[in-house]
Image (spheres, rainbow, N blue to C red):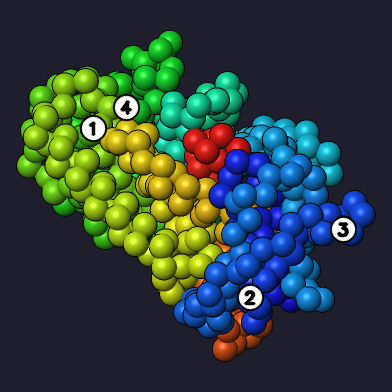
Amino acid sequence: MKKIHVNQLGYHGSDVKKAVIALDSDAFEIVRVSDNTIAFSGATAEAVYDEASAENVCVADFSGFSEEGTFVISVGTERSFPFVIGENPYIGLRSALLEMFNYQKCGVAIDKGIWSHPACHYSPATIYGTGEKKDVSGGWHDAGDYGRYIVPAAMAVADLLLAYELSPNPAPEILDVTWFEIEWMLKMQCEKTGGVYHKVSCRIFNAMDELPQDEKDELIICPITLTATADFAAAMALASRFYPVKKAVLMDAAKRAWDWCEQNPDAPNFVNPPDIGTGAYGDTISKDEIFWAACELFAATGDEKYHDVIKQSEIYVGLGWADMGTFGIAAYLSAASADPALLTEMKNTLHSVCEEIIQKFRNEPYGTSLGTTYRWGSNLDIANNAMTLLLYSKLAEKNPEYENAAREHMHYILGRNPLSQSYITDFGSLAPKNPHHRPSIAVDAAFPGMVVGGPNPTTPRDTVLQLHCEGNPPSKFYIDNQESFAANEIAIYWNSAVYFVVSLLDI
């Protein structure tokens, strides 16, 4: 295992550039790969104890070194993985992160080399508990399985649309890519009531080596839920400002969903019916989703009825699929007729969250902000913390420290972590090769540009992970193994969060 950890893609010449060294050393060298000559020598910072990895580490800061080329960090006989310093060390990364969504498309033929397959899951699905059939074809396969779920879909749509809106150089294809998911979401709304069905999948997960067109079991649409309907209302209202030709359709759908939420405030949390075993995305608290929906509808319409809901609500924060509040804050900060006092309160709330993140960041040598809490999807937590910092700097008050911290979080995902593990397939010297992703398993090759979940000591039912990592500290609780669903699965909303960060950092 490497003892010197770097971003395995590299750094722009003007970046803050750091390596983390898990060795007893007070000096380091930068060595040119081309001829093995020393390009730079420097002193490391004083060693500190990193609780998450249970190691003493020191940081090697080489920000002042800007020579272009390919290099390694050397300490004695130990060397890091190679990295590039140059104008664009991240060639292909952003486009690959986005292309993942095109590959996850359901209901259409995919032409992607060895990962190609014919159309899948295009038959009408059965609404649970009835004999009624409904066309809900389309959308993205959510993760390593072939289910399609409204709650994470809304989050991924929001991430991508905000990336398009806020990036200094947005990719024009984002809108086409995202529309494919929005079209499917519209199909998931009940025509009669305006409520939104929670998910569509088969009753149980299929075999791990089965391609999507080979999953032939009956498709089941699970019941309408409050969280799915509120998330849908928010996502459609947000989308209405990006698709002017479809604005009326999107706003009508958003308002009908909102009306359902108002009429069903005590609708129960989603729990899988006893004969359904696919992902649940159940959420016992729906107030943050209602807050997000109200903020998006107010930003889209200026209607005071939504404003009144916001004024009477707690200000919620969070960017995970179960905690959507920060999306609501972002919407309110963009509203044309926001209340000045409430606007200030929202900025202050977001600033407080950012300060909590930045205090952890200042104390963590790997440039992260999780402390010792590494849970399922820890890489999403890393990306979401970076996203929170960037949203504040973009929408509230520019803050270079926040932007630099966000960039440091990306260095972690790309290999500057205690395992020297890149967490994006096909990017980095040690990238995941065995993701928990059925199409990749079926052809024995990982589709490029997928973000895996990352270290996670909190899921004992993942026996492969637990046996391999028994006794490991939190940030080393990871295995690149296709059977490890709790550490090595992929998901659309992990890719979307990382895509947002990469887009706003313009890397």
Q: CA distance from mark 3 to mark 1?
A: 54 Å
In the visual, does 191 lie left or right of 110? left
Name the amino acid, label 3.
Thr
In the visual, does 417 lie left or right of 320? right
- The residue indicated by pointer 3 is 37
Quadrant where the N terminus sits is: bottom right
Near-viewer residue (79 or 498): 79
The structure residue drawn at horizontal position 92% and vertical position 54%, both measured from the top left corner, is 35
Q: Residue furthest top?
A: 245
Q: Nearer the viewer, mark 3 or mark 1?
A: 3
Residue 387 at least partly seen: no
Indicate whether 143 appears above or below 347.
below
- The residue indicated by pointer 2 is 26
- The residue indicated by pointer 1 is 332
Q: Secondary structure at mark 1?
A: helix
Q: How many marks?
A: 4
Residue 401 at least partly seen: yes
- First in sequence: mark 3 or mark 2? 2
